[in-house]
Image (cartoon, rainbow, N blue to C red):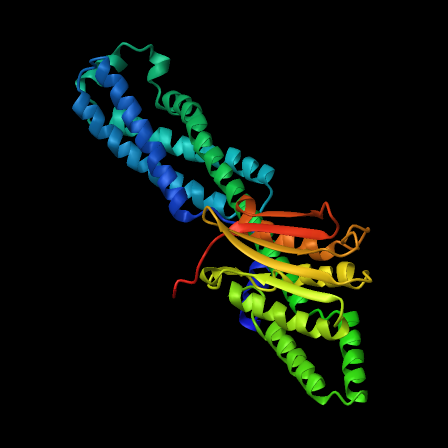
Amino acid sequence: MDRPRLERASADSARPLDRARVDPRVAALSIVGFWLFYFALNTGRYWFTSEPYQLDAMARRAVVSMFGIGLTLLLAAVLRRFDHRPIRTLFAVAAVASLPIAFTYAAFNYAAFYVVSPSPGTAAMVADWPEHKRDPLYLIVGGTFDWYFFIVTWATLYIALSYAAKVKLAEQRAAKYRAVAQTAELRALRYQINPHFLFNTLNSLSSLVLGRREEEAERMIMNLSTFFRTSLTADPTADVSLADEIRLQRLYLDIERVRFPERLLVEIDVPPELDGARIPGLLLQPLVENSIKYGVSRSKRQVTIGIRAQALDGRLRLIVEDDGDGAGPTEPGHGVGVRNVCDRLDARFGPAARCEAGAKEKGGWRVVLTLPLVFDDRR
């Protein structure tokens, strides 16, 4: 990972969960929608009951709804200051802060309907009430309790949005951790030089030099140089063409053939039309290494390592197999390469990819990879 990307990932990962905030636009839309629902519900109820003076009541209801929107925005600003606190704290703040909001709204609602030029219908209704029910404080306090639960309902919605924001941030952080971990794992795979492979290669090279087989030694040095330059310089998180991946495996096998000139036979069957298929870089390398380690090196006879590619119903099928005497990486702790390949496919393609490994009936080991068949856009 280059330095700027690493710094951005670190900054995002360092952001604490308790700093997750509700999007102000989402909060505002929820407030407007909440009060519009109230306006539509009450208007529809009174309209269907054929109450008189509906247009006048509708106009007043629109005014108090706008006032309610303003008060609820104020409540949202208060709750936003406590977004970083635990959910139980938010509930406590909402319960307390909703009370003065409800009282203020009840007072404004009383003034809008009963004080400022009340409609004849409202005036007649009030005239029929008992004396104690006409007291403004009685009406406002009673309305406060009614509206309190309405306001608290929206506050509960806000708390749910706050919790959702925290969950979303946690999921994003987990996804970034997984991405960083996967990238680190891919880079570790790319930069990991098998010490036995390097030691054996240098030992074989020394034998060629001592035996004055200069041309073979020079060819081996060039292959070794090209193999490491190719495998170490490319981006391990990028896809490569199948042709490039096969070319890299040919280099590796050519180097190993110097160690096993009589035992190693290679068969590669890749149709030309699949050369441009895109696959994760170094996908086949651990599998070919396993065939050398468990198949060729443990056998006393000639062993064939085969690499094949097939296109089946829009999917790419890759097969790496050998007919050696070894049982494959079945011992505990020796299946890291195959597991790494399978994990990479699962992380990259999910259920769209399959990874199957096991012993062959007539001896040897086979790994079958199935993944989406994708070509370079430039093709």
Tell me if I can see residue 71 in this picture. no
Q: Is residue 82 left or right of residue 40?
A: right
Q: Write the residue at 31% across / 11% down.
A: 129
Asked whether the viewer can see residue 161, the reply is: yes
Identify the residue at horizontal 69%, vertical 65% (top origin): 265
167 lies above or below 98: below
At which x and y percent is residue 106?
37, 28
- In percent of width and height, residue 24 lies at 41, 48
Place of residue 53 in the rendered image (x, y in percent of width and height, measured from the top left): 17, 19
The count of marks equals 0
Observer-nearest of 142 and 31: 31
Determine whether, in the image, residue 374 is placed left or right of residue 196: left
Is the C terminus in the top left, top right, bottom left or bottom right quadrant?
Answer: bottom left
Q: Residue at x 62, y 58 (%)?
A: 182
Residue 239 x %, y %? 52, 63
Image position of 375 (left or right of 20): left
Picture quarter with the N terminus: bottom right
Q: Residue at x 38, y 34 (%)?
A: 104
Front-most of residues 120 and 148: 148
Place residue 199 in its image quadrant: bottom right
| Of the pair 48 and 244, the residue shown nearer to us | 244
* Up/down of 118 relative to 332, above or below: above
